[in-house]
Image (cartoon, grey):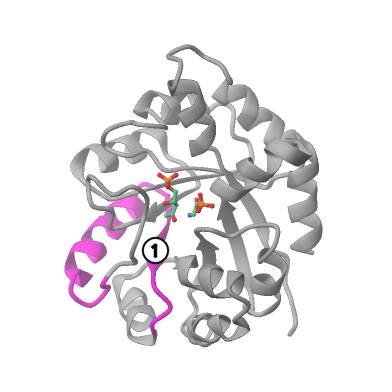
Amino acid sequence: MTQNHCKLSVNINKIATLRNSRGGNVPDLLKVAADVQKFGAQGITIHPRPDERHIRYQDARDLKSIVYTEYNIEGNPEKDFVDLVLDVKPTQVTLVPDAVDALTSNAGWDTVAHQDFLKEVIQEFHRNGIRTSIFVDPVLAMIEGAKATGTDRIELYTEAFAHEYGLGNRNGILPYTASAVLANELGLGINAGHDLSLDNIQFFNQNIPNLKEVSIGHALISESLYLGLENVVNMYLQKLK
Ligand SMILES: CC(=O)[C@@H](O)[C@H](O)COP(=O)(O)O
Ligand SMILES: NCC(=O)COP(=O)(O)O
């Protein structure tokens, strides 16, 4: 399958989790963001949650002057989150339908049921020059619904793919490829994320036409414990070529 170049956006939530566990500033989130970009990552992703258990709203503001690559902020567009994003003005906002108490993101939007709401918030972000992406499961009706919201991009929720791949089932990619083909036909940009790793990223990228960006955090930071952050960023960049 023909490939374009897919950008790596490093999700630094886990760095904030580690920092918060001791209450000080170790590890230094801003330094990690600066270093990750120096190592070659083409974006920084954060996903502040309402309880600020990892990324704090102030982190999102402080990172603005550090991130010179693509700055992607993910979250559920409740009022506080929308106000934060409009204040920070990142490159991209990714809308995720998180429950307040969710351990991590665990579903994409129902883009049909929530179409009017999504349209409204997307218009507000567009008025402020912020690119939008919405987190979706690889379901064709949800891709069509996403198009109707006016969003620039979708982010394919890759947990199911990663799970199947880990079990040795390569057919888990099929709904993702079909969704990507439709998204391309509709003129939607395609991002992807959740549980992507050094094991599965190359296969995923090779089977998704015009994949623009992947955001990766949990596996990337875990792999870095053994291999080092600079090495791991470069290993992803090699696999995304
Ligand atoms: C939308 C998505 O898949 C990621 O942002 C992921 O949910 C990371 O969030 P946590 O680090 O809070 O698990
Ligand atoms: N949008 C997905 C993301 O930012 C990172 O997800 P994960 O790699 O922490 O599962």
Secondary structure state at the residue bearing disc 1:
strand
Q: Is residue 11 above or below residue 22?
A: below
Q: Position of residue 146 (x, y in %)?
A: 34, 74
Q: Residue at x 66, y 80 (%)?
A: 207
Q: How many marks?
A: 1
Q: Which residue is the site of mark 1? A: 135
Q: Left or right: where does residue 186 sit relative to residue 26?
A: left
Above or below: residue 147 compared with residue 78: below
Q: Residue at x 38, y 82 (%)?
A: 139
For disc 1, the neighbor class at 10 Å (few under 14, some 14 to 19, many from 20) is many
Residue 123 visible here:
yes
* Residue type highlighted by circle 1: Phe
Q: Which residues are magenta?
A: 110-139
How far across and down, in percent of the image, does residue 221 sit? 62, 41
> Is 113 one of the magenta-colored residues?
yes
Q: Is residue 226 left or right of residue 73?
A: right
Quadrant in which residue 73 is drawn: top left
Rendered location of residue 150, percent (x, y) = 34, 70
**Depth check: 175 or 181 in front?**
175
Residue in the image at 61% along x and 46% along y: 43
Image quadrant in which the N terminus is located: bottom right
Front residue of this view, candidates 125 and 33 = 33
Specify whether tag 1 is near ligand 1 (CB below 8 Å).
Answer: yes
